[in-house]
């Protein structure tokens, strides 16, 4: 009787999980395996020729493609600028709105709003703001800075995209830091105040050390997110990567290779190279934060 009840529980659990299992297999596992197979084939949407096995030729072509190598450097440059900037700003905002300030719910909502705004809409808005006669240049001209054509100059296009990305994502990381701050006992801050510690000392000696697991989590998530950046780069720079390809990221390069050059084999190989880079960087971050860090 007991075994029968146990079997019924397993069957019920399986039936309830079946929609997820099916969607996982159809939309994740199958495409992943199929893309891995295609990365070893000469495969194109065009023509009726069947795909044929080419070994590691696609990986060799990907790793010797100058535009793809440049896109890797562009993406790493973008990640190095975005990740620390958005995490520092998010932590400061979280500490400020976590304190006993007036209208903190209003400020939390305001800072989080860009996160739920469509990246496409955000990109279009900033395209107008960054125009030569746009609001950004008008403000800068009042303080003596020469107006720039931000999205059409190789030196400025990526920093301009970084600004848009930080503005659009800082709210998400602020909220996760807020959840971490809620777990720190007030008694620690009260004891520090008794000892004469100021706000900066409390931030450095109490908040940051106790938020280390959350900082690790946000760093990993932010790095993975920036390494997969597509929408802003594509909308602002197009499939050619903007001026001199300076806005070309790895994912845009994969899209260009697959759907503009119709070379699915090389595009799949590039995708697995990107997967390897993300996996390697995640391992490095885990090593830097300590092996005991886990979620």
Image (cartoon, rainbow, N blue to C red):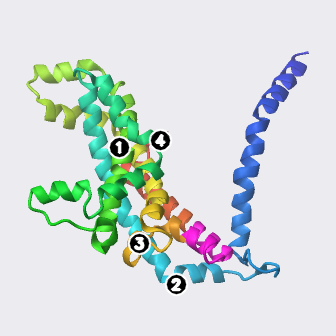
**Vertical side of 231 occupied by 252: above or below:** below
Which residue in the protein does label 4 denote? 294
Which residue in the protein does label 2 denote? 64
Tag 4 and tag 1, C-beta contact below 8 Å: no
The answer to whether 208 appears left or right of 275 in the picture is left
The answer to whether 264 appears left or right of 227 in the picture is right
**Vertical side of 98 occupied by 85: above or below:** below
Label 2 crowding class (10 Å Cα cut-off): few <14, some 14-19, many 20+?
few
Tag 4 and tag 3, C-beta contact below 8 Å: no
Image quarter of residue 76: bottom left
Dominant SS of magenta comes to helix
Closer to the camera in the image, 200 or 136: 136
Which residue in the protein does label 3 denote? 242
Counting labels gives 4
Label 1 sits on a secondary structure element that is helix
Label 2 sits on a secondary structure element that is loop
Which stretch appears magenta?
254-272
- Of the two numbered discs 1 and 3 on the same chain, state the one appearing first in sequence: 1
Image quarter of residue 79: bottom left
Of the two numbered discs 4 and 1 in the rendering, the one whose residue sits closer to the viewer: 1
Q: CA distance from mark 4 to mark 1?
A: 23 Å
Q: CA distance from mark 2 to mark 4?
A: 37 Å
Of the two numbered discs 2 and 3 in the rendering, the one whose residue sits closer to the viewer: 3
Instruction: Reply yes or no: does residue 255 show up in magenta.
Output: yes
Which residue in the protein does label 1 denote? 170
Label 4 crowding class (10 Å Cα cut-off): few <14, some 14-19, many 20+?
few
- Of the two numbered discs 4 and 3 on the same chain, state the one appearing first in sequence: 3
- Of the two numbered discs 2 and 3 on the same chain, state the one appearing first in sequence: 2
Of the two numbered discs 4 and 3 in the rendering, the one whose residue sits closer to the viewer: 3
Q: CA distance from mark 2 to mark 3?
A: 21 Å
Q: CA distance from mark 4 to mark 3?
A: 39 Å
- Of the two numbered discs 2 and 4 on the same chain, state the one appearing first in sequence: 2
């Amino acid at each position: 009787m007991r075994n029968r009840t146990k079997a019924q529980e397993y069957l019920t659990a399986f039936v309830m999980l079946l929609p997820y299992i099916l969607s996982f297999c159809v939309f994740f596992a199958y495409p992943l395996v199929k893309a891995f197979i295609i990365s070893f084939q000469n495969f194109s949407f065009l023509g009726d020729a069947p795909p044929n096995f080419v070994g590691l030729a696609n990986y060799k072509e990907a790793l010797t493609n100058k535009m793809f190598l440049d896109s890797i450097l562009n993406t790493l440059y973008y990640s190095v600028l975005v990740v620390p900037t958005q995490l520092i700003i998010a932590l400061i905002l979280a500490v400020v709105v976590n304190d006993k300030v007036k209208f903190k719910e209003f400020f939390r909502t305001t800072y989080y709003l860009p996160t739920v705004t469509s990246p496409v809409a955000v990109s279009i808005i900033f395209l107008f703001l960054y125009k030569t006669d746009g609001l950004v240049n008008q403000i800068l001209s009042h303080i003596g800075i020469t107006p720039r054509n931000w999205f059409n100059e190789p030196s400025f296009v990526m920093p301009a995209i970084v600004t848009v990305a930080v503005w659009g994502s800082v709210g998400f990381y602020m909220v996760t830091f807020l959840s971490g701050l809620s777990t720190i006992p007030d008694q620690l801050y009260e004891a520090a105040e008794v000892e004469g510690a100021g706000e900066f000392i409390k931030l450095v000696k109490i908040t940051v050390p106790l938020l280390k697991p959350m900082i690790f989590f946000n760093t990993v998530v932010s790095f993975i997110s920036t390494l997969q950046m597509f929408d802003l780069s594509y909308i602002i720079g197009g499939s050619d990567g903007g001026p001199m390809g300076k806005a070309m990221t790895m994912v845009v390069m994969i899209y260009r290779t697959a759907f503009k050059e119709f070379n699915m084999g090389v595009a799949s190989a590039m995708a697995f190279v990107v997967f390897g880079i993300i996996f390697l960087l995640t391992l490095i971050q885990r090593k830097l934060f300590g092996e005991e860090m886990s979620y």
